[in-house]
Image (tube, coloured by chain):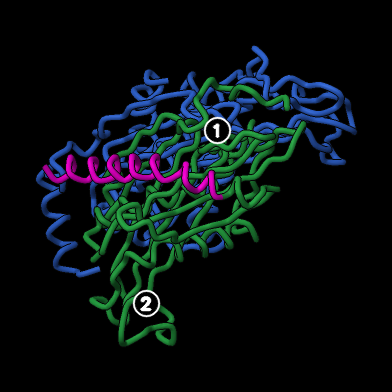
Amino acid sequence: MNQDFKNHINKSLNKNIRMDGRKKDEFRKITIETGVISTAEGSARVKCGETELIVGVKMGVGNPYPDIPEEGVLMTGAELYPLSNPEFEGGPPRERAIETARVIDRGIRESGTIDTKKLCIKAGEQVWMVFLDVAPVNMDGNLIDIGCLAAMAALKNAKFPEFKDGKPDYKKLSKKSLPISKVPIEVTVAKIGDNFLVDLTDDEEKFVDARLTVAILEDGNLCAMQKGGDSPLSEDDVFKMIDLAIKKSKELRKLL
Amino acid sequence: MTFKKRPDGRKFDQTREIEAKAGIIKKADGSAYFRIGKTAAYAAVYGPRELFPRSQQDPKKGRLRCNYNMMPFSGAGERVRPGPSRRSKEISMVSEKALLPVVDLSDYPNAVVDVFIELPQTDAGSRCAGICAASIALADAGITMRNMVSAVSCGKVDDKVMIDLDYEEESYEDGDVADIPVAMVPDTGEITLLQMDGKIKKEDLKKAIEMVKKPLKEIVEIQKKVLKERYK
């Protein structure tokens, strides 16, 4: 990155000026639509500024893991489609796509959002498998936060297919929803120079020194974290970022 | 012959409802959305941009590269495993050949024009929807084109010749089914994609191709209309 440009961005941020005129702790406008994909058991389309992504839930029936024979399976995938950004390339998922999927997965898994024991059909033999897939259509930054928000909206929207003769009947959805108990919200706070920002655009993400993603529950407790970026963070930074993340999570929670 | 009426009540020469939009993906140089019934396709065009590896570059003209992909939740049954499959690679290739005749690449030596087609939901006819979207997206990106390509399927279920088969019709079991995706330059009548699976008599094939010309002309008008709207 051009150092002069970076200095300029830093100076502007010190004066509270962001590239698109937002405040440092301000999200872009978010809209959530659910039930947008007829072939999925649950789905959501979320737009945040120019970022647009679809999350779909597919459910299948499969074998449980041998060490947890009474629990269903939740899997989260994310692909960075070259359709959604000129910098994304085809081929198998790379570091960034894998990190995105894993961080979203961790928030949902560690919060105990879905009681996987309730996904058991027959212990040791058949369990429901819930596949959550994050599909960006236009990627203009903040994929993790928006992906997590869309994932929660899609999970809430999902209905089990009818279960007949040992297999799911995808033509008929039941009225039964997924056993969702908690709703984690992920907020990524980025540090650029001495400034903390949320909801970065694709252009802003290029200047990030360090970032911290925090998954937050309704009671304000944390259930997952991920530090990213090349620069280190002080303990003081970390707690400032967590406080900002908690504050913003309350706003995002209202959208669901 | 038991197939008398189409499950969704359409006439035999009637397509499903069509919705199209141009320029919906801001990060792309050109983009489009095309939906026919419950089959939806996004297409984004990036380029002309430098082609890597360099060994694939052609100093005389640019290259057109298509990639067709179904999103994991876009199939009617189980989750579609992410990543390329034999099917998606073949469809990518035939889509590329379907578009190539109208794209003039001589202005873009050593470059590549990338077309990415993503299907968020499908109900048969996805390659045709993808080609329709791609054709709009290429024009939206300002790529030199001689004409527009439109695509829709035709075929036969039992003894009835029809167009734009949906999944329920394609999987009809009490009689022969033929599914024939066709891409055409409707202005000239040139066929740029033709595939078939199933069973059909030569006379019926002739009838089907005759029947598919009118809807293709209607589709190309929709494609042109959304492009004009975008640049009004």
Residue A231 seen in the current view: yes
Q: Is residue B220 left or right of residue A149?
A: left
Q: Amino acid at mark 2?
A: Leu
Q: What residue lies at 13% left-to-right and 40% top-to-bottom?
A: A21
Q: Is residue A233 left or right of residue B70?
A: left
* Most common SS among magenta residues: helix
Q: Is residue A68 left or right of residue A97?
A: right
- Residue B51, which numbered label? 2
Q: Position of residue A139 (x, y in %)?
A: 35, 48
Pick the residue in front: B15 or A116.
B15
Chain corresponding to green in the figure: B
Q: Position of residue A135 (x, y in %)?
A: 48, 43
Magenta residues, start to end: B206-232
Label 2 packing within 10 angstroms: few (<14), some (14-19), many (20+): some
Q: Which residue is mark 1?
A: A223
**Vertical arrangement, residue B228 with respect to residue A218, above or below:** below
Q: Position of residue A200 (x, y in %)?
A: 29, 45
- Residue A215, which numbered label? none
Residue A198 seen in the current view: no
Q: Would you say residue B227 sits in the magenta stretch?
A: yes
Callout 1 and callout 2 share a chain: no
Q: In which quadrant will I find the N terminus of chain A?
A: bottom left
Pick the residue in front: B197 or A219.
B197
**Vertical arrangement, residue B70 with respect to residue A109, above or below:** below
